[in-house]
Amino acid sequence: MAQTAVSVCLVLTLSLIQGVSCQEWGVNLTHYHICAVSRSSVVMPCSFNHPPNLTVAKVFWAKDPQPATERTDLSNNPEYKDRVLYSGTKNCTMTLKHIKLSDAGFYHPRIVTNIAKQKWLGQPGLNLFITELSVWIPRPVVEGREVKMSCNNSCSPAQKPTVIWRKNGVDVSAQQTKHDQLILGRVSVEDEGNYSCALKSFQGYPSKPVRLNVMFSPKNTTLSITSTDKILKGTSVTLTCSSDANPPVENYTWFKVNQSTPVGSGQQYSITNISFEDGGQYYCEARNKYGADNSTVKSITVEGPPNHTSASVSPSGDLKEGTSVTLTCSSDVTPPVENFTWFYSDGSTASQVGAGKYYMIGQGSSEHNGYYYCEAKNKHGASNSTDIHLIFHYAPRNTSVSMSPSGEIVDGSSVTLTCSSDANPPVENYTWFKVDDSTPVGSGQQYSIANISSEDGGQYYCEARNKYGAENSTAVLMEIHVDHTLVMYVVIGVSSGCGLLGLLFFIRLKCKAEKIEETNQVNDIYDNDTFDHNTDIDSVYQNYTPGGAGNEDDDDEIYQNA
């Protein structure tokens, strides 16, 4: 407070009788009011003036004196024993130590002179307020929000005591204070600490410190694994989630990347007898009433022998003979497969046919038909794929016809023709043909003729067909045998006719030969030097008859009779 010199003039009856001027008496108090902190010491500055003809005998202070009663020296009060200190007779300043709440009240300086009735009592005195300091912090204090801390005291507003704030014993910037409040705009964890307040005039007597506890959602969430990132199949692993939160984390939840639902809960997540399917990326979520935070993703790699080994074929579907085929071996395993081996089985025994991830068949044929599988191996073991059954399909081939009965076929009996063919897939349609007939005579693998007749004789063949093509058999001859008596007559007639024709033919040839011979003889006569060229040639031919037989007309007549 501003110091104010207060002159108090007390008019005493005795002084007036003796003619003493009131202006010669005076008490100067620096403060009307003082607000002191409990347990501290307070100084009450005071000075006075007195008439020069008086000698000051004693200066003391009285508390709440009652009118018309003798003022009691405060130092003689047992409640103030050893706590009151006077400055002497030169001034009236008093120091009160170890202040209690009960010390509050009005204090008056008392000046006693050498004349018994010449006494002075300072009026209106000094009003002493005693206060306890305490820090009040609203609850809860949440990170990111504004917080206002108050320094509670019982000093009157008119006194307007200056409040100072300390964090962990260090003064806080004055720019943050407003009256008796400390305002933090956006509180953070860094603002946490022990806060106390003090009155500027009593800095040595601060309030008890109060902890500023900032609430915040989980942060710095981490995931740790009890073992290395590479775990052998069949062993166990434990994942632990840690997070910084206030209040502490209430719920931990475990997730696996690419799975929509949680895989576990609790601060720890354990996997026993781990499998390849358990491998992947994991993370945890830490949550309290103020929010949640996720850890970074942690990968778990499960090692072991090859798993889910499979073989595939390209192209897939039906394979036609002559097609090129590639077999591929795949396995889901860590560490990767070191060796792939291919095997072929005919259903009873297996043999190695190749190595490597791929096995190729250049021109597939029925010889390649069978079962194929691959073996995948790494440092932890090996596993086999399931079998792939390769079948190369082809059009019918080696098509042939068999006849039953196979011996002599008699007119009126029955016969069955059977068509056979090698095909994959099997023959779908059999069709029967008779040579020189434009239309089929039947269908099905067998073709039967009942009550056979001579008209059924001839050459027959079959056509075998599947989805990949068709092939015809060679033709077989079907000969029909009739009744033996009739056959004998036919044979005799045919033989006789053939013999007669042969005889006639022989006779004609002989005649022609004789004619040629006679002609040659005539030519010899011309060529002979003894021949008379003047001989009349016509006379030679006039009497010539070849072989003594008739002429050519006679020969033709013989053939006509035949």
Image: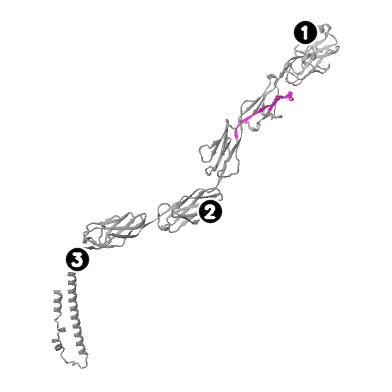
Q: Is residue 466 above or below residue 91?
A: below
Q: SS at mark 2?
A: strand
Question: Residue 110's spot in the image, x, y percent?
Answer: 80, 13
Of the residues shown, which amino acid type is indicated by label 2?
Asn
Quickly name the residue at label 2: 339
**Considering the image in quadrants, where does the C terminus appear?**
bottom left
Question: Residue 190's spot in the image, x, y percent?
Answer: 65, 33
Q: SS at mark 1?
A: loop
**Crowding near the residue tagged with mark 3, few <14, some 14–19, many ≥20 C-alpha atoms within 10 Å:** few
345 lies left or right of 208: left
Q: In this view, does 289 lie above or below 50?
A: below
Of the residues shown, which amino acid type is indicated by label 3?
Val
Q: What stretch is highlighted in magenta?
A: 195-218
Which quadrant of the view contains residue 4? top right
Please report the residue visible at 65 percent of the width from the left and 31 percent of the height from the top: 191
Look at the image and tell me whether residue 109 can be seen: no
Lower sequence index among marks 3 and 2: 2
Quickly name the residue at label 1: 69
Label at residue 487: 3
